[in-house]
């Protein structure tokens, strides 16, 4: 854990890490999930020096998890798929549906 995190963020990190381990994630993967989640929440709250557009404009991790817990796992959002397609320079991505974006990215959902 970086020393720049507040006590609140350290508690959040530990809670997320333990939850991931309880769900069967390896210790290494649990640490990664926790660190990414805390860093995203810090970016959303304006606590970090830099933040990506998706970190600040995407819905919060807690809200997204809550929404998905009721309808089953549905993978990444269309916006997340679009951003990945943009990084990979997929042509025609702006006209694609979520399903088409998923297919163009090789079904990694």
Image (spheres, helix red, strand yellow):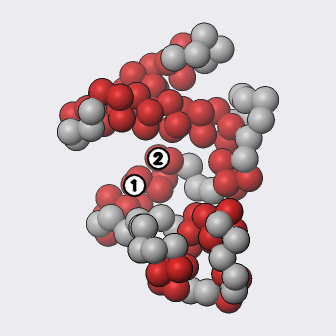
Q: Is residue 3 left or right of residue 99?
A: right
Disc 1 marks which residue? 66
Mark 1 crowdedness (10 Å alpha carbons): few <14, some 14-19, many ≥20: few
Q: Give above or below for 6 relative to 99.
A: above
Q: CA distance from mark 1 to mark 2?
A: 6 Å
* Residue at x-position 66% and y-position 48%: 55
Marking on residue 58: none
Residue drawn at the location 73% of the way across and 29% of the way down: 48
Determine the image quadrant of residue 24. top left
Whether the residues at callouts 1 and 2 have beta carbons within 8 Å, the answer is yes
Q: Quadrant of residue 9?
A: top right
In this view, which residue lies farthest toward the top? Answer: 3
- In this rendered view, identify the residue nearer to me: 93 or 54: 93
Q: Position of residue 32 (x, y in %)?
A: 44, 33
- Position of the C terminus, as image quadrant, is bottom left
Where 24 sits versus 4, above or below? Answer: below
Judging by the rendered image, the residue that carries numbered circle 2 is 62
Tag count: 2
Q: From this viewpoint, is residue 91 visible?
A: yes
Up the image or down, 93 lies above or below 4; here it is below
**Residue 27 coordinates in the image, percent (x, y):** 30, 27
Asked which secondary structure carries label 2, the reply is helix
Please name the residue shown 72% across and 47% down the image.
52
* SS state under label 1: helix
- Residue 109 lies left or right of residue 88; in this view the side is left
- Give how far across and how far down residue 14 sits, in percent: 39, 22
Name which residue lies at 45% across and 74% down.
Answer: 106
């Amino acid at each position: 854990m970086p020393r720049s995190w507040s006590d609140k963020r350290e508690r959040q990190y530990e809670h997320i890490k333990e939850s991931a381990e309880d769900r069967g994630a390896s210790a290494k993967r649990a640490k990664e999930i926790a660190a990414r989640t805390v860093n995203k929440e810090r970016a959303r709250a304006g606590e970090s020096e830099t933040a990506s557009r998706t970190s600040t404009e995407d819905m919060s991790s807690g809200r997204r998890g809550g929404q998905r817990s009721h309808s089953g796992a549905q993978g990444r959002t269309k916006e997340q798929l679009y951003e990945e397609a943009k990084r990979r320079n997929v042509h025609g991505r702006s006209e694609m549906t979520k399903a088409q974006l998923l297919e163009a990215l090789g079904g990694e959902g």
